[in-house]
Structure formats: C-alpha cells, structure tokens
C-alpha cells in the first residue's frame, strides 16, 4: 500500500491563553521533507521551522485505524527535528488509513517548552489535558480507567415517565451510611429526574442484559420511557417510586443524598434505603458469587467486558516490624 500524506493540519498552541493558530497544507504522495517544508511555507507556516518554536513538539496522528494500532504509540524524539520532518516521518513509518490509503496528521506544537522530554520520555508519552482537549483526553481516560462497573439507573420523572439508562462512572461512595454514586456527563434525563423526585434505583447489569443495556443508552426524548421503548420488564420497588429491572440480579433503591457539579458533569450521591438480590446468585453463606452475578463492565470506545479470570489473595496484616 502506498503511503500518502493527504492533508496535514498543524495547530500551534502557544503557552499564552487564547493564542492559537492553525495551518493546512496538502503535499504529494511520498513527499520529502523539502516538499513538505515548501507546502507549509506556502500555507504560511514557514515560521514554525524556528527551533525554539519546536522544542516541545507533541504529535498526534489521528485516524480511527491509527488509534487502534500500536504503531501510533511509537513516537520518538526524532519528531522534535521540525514540523516538516514530523509530517514526512509519518509517511516513512507507513502510517496509513487502511480504508482511504492516506495518513492524516494533526500536529500540535507548543512553544516555550524547555525540551522534547516534556512530551516524550523513552517509551512513555506525556499527555497534557489542556493541549489534547476534553474530547481526546476523555477517550484516553475511559480507555485506561477500566474496567468500570455499570449503574443501570432507573428514575421516574415528575410527569411519571420511567427512565432507564446506563452510567459507567459509578462506585460505592460511603459504607455507613451506605451511599452509591454515579456521574451524569451533561444534563441527562437520569440527573433531571433525580433532581425533580429525589429517588432512583441502581440495577446491576448482568451478561444476559448486554444488548438491552446498550439500547437504553440511546438518547430518547424525555417523554419516552426506555422500559417500554426497549421492551424491558420491570417490577415495583419497595421504598422508592422508580421501578426496578425485573431481570437484574441485584438492585439498590436510593434516595438523593446530594449532588456535586464538576465542570460539565454532576456527581449524584444516593443513600441506599433498600436492596434486593436474586437468591440464585448466592452461595450457601448468603454471599453473592461473582460467577453467578456475571456483571458487565465498560471499557474504552465501544468495548465492554465480562469478569474473566478471578484471583483471590488475602490482605497482609502489618505486624509492626520494619
């Protein structure tokens, strides 16, 4: 397959708030460093060849295929040689989009960095959330903070519409009193309903609910209930108004404790007032067995996971000896 640099976009993020410049240049297939330099100069980016402006260069080659390829992580110090060299190097490495046969490079140059080690250290790449932007860093976080348990949150609106949605930013927040937390990224129906009524149910997602859980992540309008839209059987809760998922092996009925707004997200804390569990997942001592619960978890992109191999190890008590 022929390697082509089809479009190269160089975005310069200077270390001064609000100062940002973007350039675009098109170069021929198999372009040399000189050809890339000429194209960039014609596009008005020639001044970026100054060594001082490239001391802390950081490069992203952004195609869906590259994000799924280990080669995308193989950036070396040679990228700090110059903007033209960076783009030509992408061609020499054979980084191509299998579908289009092209490589599209998005280059961010940060001025004023003392040296390239700010971004590249051996086989590790340093990432700055402010440089990458919220969307790119979100994809990185959700692909590395894994696996994440899923809260299948059931709520009822003030108008009586039963909502059901998966939230993978979820965990235990407190032991006594028992408090669970989930995060709404943006103003989703789950959050609005909890704020209106002060109640919700966290249903455990098990392997048989894989497709149904994913379907409830669709952005239905607020007046459409996911239980009915997806065809999910519900059962009444004991202590709160929102129903439970009938097939869920365990569920926690919660009343709103508090919310905390963090940027574009809101963390919802709910005090557990009642829990229910399917007896079929319990062992003889009444303890839930992980193989019977068969919970699902979220990974990065569109990936989900099952429990897989389970290992056990006891904690080592501190004996006071150094």
Image: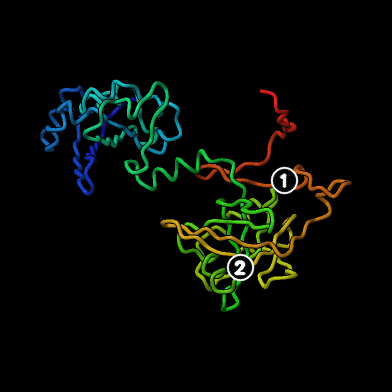
Q: Nearer the viewer, residue 3 or 253?
A: 253
Give the mark toward the camera: 1 or 2. Answer: 2
Picture quadrant of residue 14:
top left
Closer to the N terminus: mark 1 or mark 2?
Answer: 2
**Image vertical order of residue 165 relative to residue 207, above or below:** below
Residue 112 in percent (x, y) is at 22, 33
Residue reaching furthest to the bottom:
159
Residue 146: x %, y % from top left: 56, 40
The residue lying at 79 percent from left, 48 percent from top is 288
Q: Residues within 10 Å of mark 2 (few under 14, many from 20)?
A: many
Which element is circle 1 on?
Answer: loop
* Residue at point 28%, 29% (across, down): 4
**Label 1 crowd bin: few (<14), some (14–19), many (20+), radius 10 Å:** some
- Residue 191 in view, yes or no: yes
Residue 233 in sight: no
Apparent side of residue 257 relative to residue 123 in the rendered image (left or right): right
Provide residue 11's location: percent of width, then percent of height.
23, 40
Q: Give the CA distance from mark 1 to mark 2.
A: 24 Å
Q: Quadrant of the N terminus?
A: top left
Q: Residue at x 47, y 57 (%)?
A: 185
Side (left or right) of 189 relative to 12: right
Residue 117 in picture, x, y percent from top left: 32, 25
Which residue is at the front of the view, 136 or 8?
136
Task: Report which residue position mark 2 lands on.
Answer: 155
List the residue tagged with mark 1.
Answer: 294
Name the one closer to the observer, 132 or 305: 132
């Amino acid at each position: 397959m022929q390697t082509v640099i089809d479009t190269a976009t160089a975005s310069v993020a200077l270390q001064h708030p609000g100062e940002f410049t973007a350039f675009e240049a098109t170069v021929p297939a198999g372009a040399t460093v000189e050809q890339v330099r000429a194209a960039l100069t014609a596009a008005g980016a020639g001044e970026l060849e100054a060594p001082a402006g490239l001391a802390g260069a950081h490069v992203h080659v952004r195609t869906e295929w590259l994000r799924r390829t280990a080669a995308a992580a193989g950036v070396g110090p040679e990228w700090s040689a110059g903007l033209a060299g960076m783009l030509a190097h992408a061609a020499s490495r054979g980084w191509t989009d299998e579908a289009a046969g092209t490589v599209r490079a998005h280059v961010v140059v940060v001025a004023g960095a003392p040296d390239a080690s700010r971004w590249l250290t051996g086989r590790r790449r340093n990432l700055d959330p402010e440089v990458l932007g919220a969307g790119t860093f979100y994809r990185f976080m959700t692909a590395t903070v894994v696996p994440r348990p899923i809260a299948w949150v059931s709520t009822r609106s003030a108008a009586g519409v039963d909502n059901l949605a998966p939230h993978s930013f979820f965990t235990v927040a407190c032991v006594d009193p028992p408090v669970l937390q989930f995060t709404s990224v943006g103003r989703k129906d789950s959050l609005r309903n909890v704020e209106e009524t002060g109640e919700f149910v966290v249903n455990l997602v098990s392997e048989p609910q894989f497709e149904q859980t994913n379907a409830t992540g669709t952005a239905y309008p607020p007046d459409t209930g996911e239980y009915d839209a997806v065809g999910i059987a519900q059962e009444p809760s004991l202590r709160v108004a929102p129903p439970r998922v009938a097939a869920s092996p365990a569920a926690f009925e919660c009343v709103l404790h508090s919310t905390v707004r963090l940027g574009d997200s809101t963390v919802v804390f709910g005090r557990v007032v009642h829990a229910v569990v399917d007896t079929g997942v319990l062992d003889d001592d009444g303890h839930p067995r992980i193989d019977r619960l068969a919970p699902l978890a979220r990974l990065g992109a569109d990936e989900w996971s099952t429990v897989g191999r389970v290992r056990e190890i006891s904690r080592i008590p501190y004996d006071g000896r150094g």
